[in-house]
Image: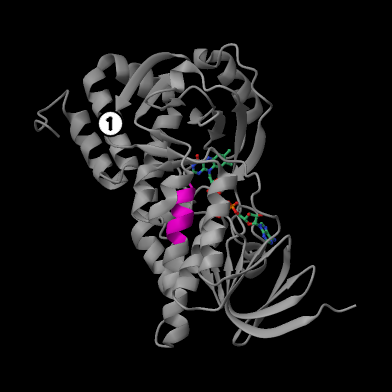
Amino acid sequence: MSLPLHSFQYDAIVVGLGPAGASTAYELGQLGMSVLAFDKQVHPRYKVCGGGLSARIERILPADFKTIVEATVYRVQFIYGGTDSFIVESPQPVAYMVMRQTFDQWLVEKARQAGVEIREEESVVAIQELEDGVEVATGKGRYRGRVVIGADGAMSVVAQQCFPGRDVGNIPALESEYHGNTPHAFQGTHTVLISLRGAKKGYGWIFPKKRGLSLGVGEFVRGGNRPKRSFEDFIRHESALAGLSIPSPVGHPLPIAHHQANRFGHRWAGSLVRHRAVLVGDAGRLVDPLLGEGIYYAVRSGQLAAASVATTLRDPRHRLEEYGTKVEAEFGPEFRVASRLGAIIYGLPRSCHWWAGRTFPETYQRVLRRYCELLQGRETYQTLWTKILQRLRGPFGRSSPGS
Ligand SMILES: Cc1cc2nc3c(=O)[nH]c(=O)nc-3n(C[C@H](O)[C@H](O)[C@H](O)COP(=O)(O)OP(=O)(O)OC[C@H]3O[C@@H](n4cnc5c(N)ncnc54)[C@H](O)[C@@H]3O)c2cc1C
């Protein structure tokens, strides 16, 4: 039996309603586009994620987002296997903690209020390119739109079908949620803990929530990863977790930006836009290769995509590829530095943290403070890299005061 064809022509069909899809749909709705958006699940739904938002996200989210924030973080503790602790504090927020089920549902409601037609529990299974648009098939029907937005995460169906032959290497990451009274070490100033020994070529993290903790590990190299074992080692070594009964973690792939391709002249335009299909968020592999931060880039790429889709549909002199060019300009140089830093830090975590911390404690403390300023949007990876190079020269040469 063939599926019914809903012949109504939408301007855009959005596949997936995580932060990337919900933001794209919301922005398109605000721009007056007719939008149909699908999710295979029903919100609120659990998503494997730490729910840590770098504070700079407040510049790009609707102003009332703080109503759904669980904890505001002013303090980050960097540690190596339970020892050699460095603490960075700031009077301004460094990060905001959310529960993904609440955050994502809040974004979906924003999209609904902007006039987006939302269809949940409807999984997209196929996309067919038409001359002047696309036909999207779900288990319940077929729908036509002028553009399809792939916002369906790390295992994106849109990416697989519309971008064949694309590199799909993901790295493994695990998360567990402890529900109970927040341990003393994470109360008050709301501390985030980052352990550089917490994972092989990666890190372990503990994020405070209103009633408990989110914790996990991410390993930032492909192949040879044993995240389950790293997770067990991590919770065994962290004194902050002593006595807590931590549930088994859940895994999910993390599609970090493919920096090697970038190094050899790769351009985002071709990997994010093809014919009438556009990829945003994890579907486009827009995850920071140092930290594994994806939510900021999901929201921001959704905004950039929505602006380009609306401009292109209204004015044929524009091309969808402009979205890829904007992503390249805004994220490309940042991700390249982030992956360079990741190669150094995760390649030699003991030297970076333990040795640098003991040999040049003040310089190291400053670098960590700069990193927190990056999360606040007061630094970029590029300016941070320049300052690190200046600081490294410091012990051997002269460094400018106050830098
Ligand atoms: C363990 C772990 C911890 C993390 N912690 C953080 C963190 O603290 N901070 C941070 O910034 N990032 C974190 N990330 C990364 C972050 O979770 C992702 O980058 C972010 O969720 C990307 O958003 P998205 O909207 O692109 O994709 P997703 O959030 O994955 O959303 C995709 C949506 O598409 C839907 N979907 C999928 N397939 C279909 C289909 N065929 N049809 C219809 N719908 C479909 C799904 O149901 C889902 O709702 C973490 C990731 C992992 C794995």
Q: On the image, numbered disc 1 is attached to which residue?
A: 90
Does residue 320 appear anywhere in the picture?
Answer: no
Magenta residues, start to end: 294-301
Residue visible at 33% across and 37% down? 93
Say how many tags the image has: 1
Residue 295 painted magenta: yes
Query: In the image, residue 343 lies at what x, y percent?
Result: 42, 36
Quadrant occupied by the C terminus: top left
Query: In the image, residue 159 lies at what x, y percent?
Result: 62, 63
Residue 76 painted magenta: no
Does residue 197 appear anywhere in the picture?
Answer: yes
Taking the image as shown, residue 388 lies to the left or right of residue 182, namely left
Q: Nearer the viewer, residue 305 or 74?
A: 74
Please identify the dominant SS of the magenta region: helix
Query: In the image, residue 46 lies at what x, y percent?
Result: 65, 44
Taking the image as shown, residue 275 lies to the left or right of residue 403, namely right
Residue at disc 1, secondary structure = loop
Q: Dot 1: within a 10 Å radius of its alpha carbon, few (fewer than 14), some, or many (20 or more) residues? A: some
Query: In the image, residue 231 lies at what x, y percent?
Result: 60, 25
Residue visible at 86% across and 79% down? 2
Vertical arrangement, residue 182 with respect to residue 44, above or below: above
